[in-house]
Image (tube, helix red, strand yellow):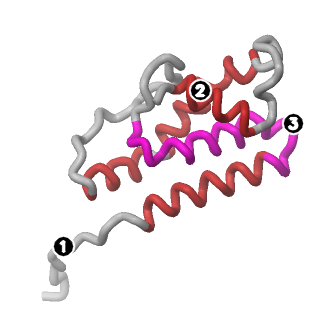
Amino acid sequence: MTYQEILDASVRMVCEGTYSDSYTKDYTERAPYILAAFLSHCASLDVKYRRAHGLEEAEPFEGVTVTLTDSFLLPTVFSAAAIFYLSAMLTIEESEEMSDRFFALCSDALSAIEAALPTTVEAIVDKYE
């Protein structure tokens, strides 16, 4: 999945998929920065998810923007949350109520990912000696 596909899904989520490209130009300009913020926001959960599922550790994302034609850096399970997050941020100025609903969906999706992670057993250190 590319960032462009996430943007396309997000535009359709906010019911603007039938308008011309010029109408959504603002969204296309802002999306790379918003998606970069999402990657940073999800960094610690991504590490936990990858460890729990035996996936290769990813290089930390340190940018402020992404290229829309690049592949989404997080596991696919994060894609719905990314779409909701982008939808929330793109609509925050036009409709605070709609933005809040999308942000709640994003939060729920991220919470579900974290809740589904298996527990880990670690040794307890006795600090009262």
> Which residue is located at x 47 percent, y 39 percent?
40
> Type of residue at label 2?
Tyr
Residue 49: in magenta span: no
Q: Which residue is mark 3?
A: 94
Q: Quick one: label 2 or label 3, which is nearer the N terminus? A: 2
Residue 32 located left or right of residue 92:
left
Residue 73 screen position, x and y as percent: 40, 33
Q: Is residue 66 above or below residue 126?
A: above
Q: Farthest residue toward the front?
A: 18
Q: Which of the two residues, 76 or 115, is positioned nearer the viewer here?
A: 76
**Spatial separation of the CA atoms under disc 3 and disc 1:** 47 Å
- Secondary structure state at the residue bearing disc 2: helix
Q: Which of the two residues, 108 or 77, is positioned nearer the viewer here?
A: 77
Q: Magenta span covers which residues?
A: 74-98
Residue 13 screen position, x and y as percent: 72, 39
Q: Is residue 110 above or below residue 85?
A: below
Q: Farthest residue toward the bottom?
A: 129
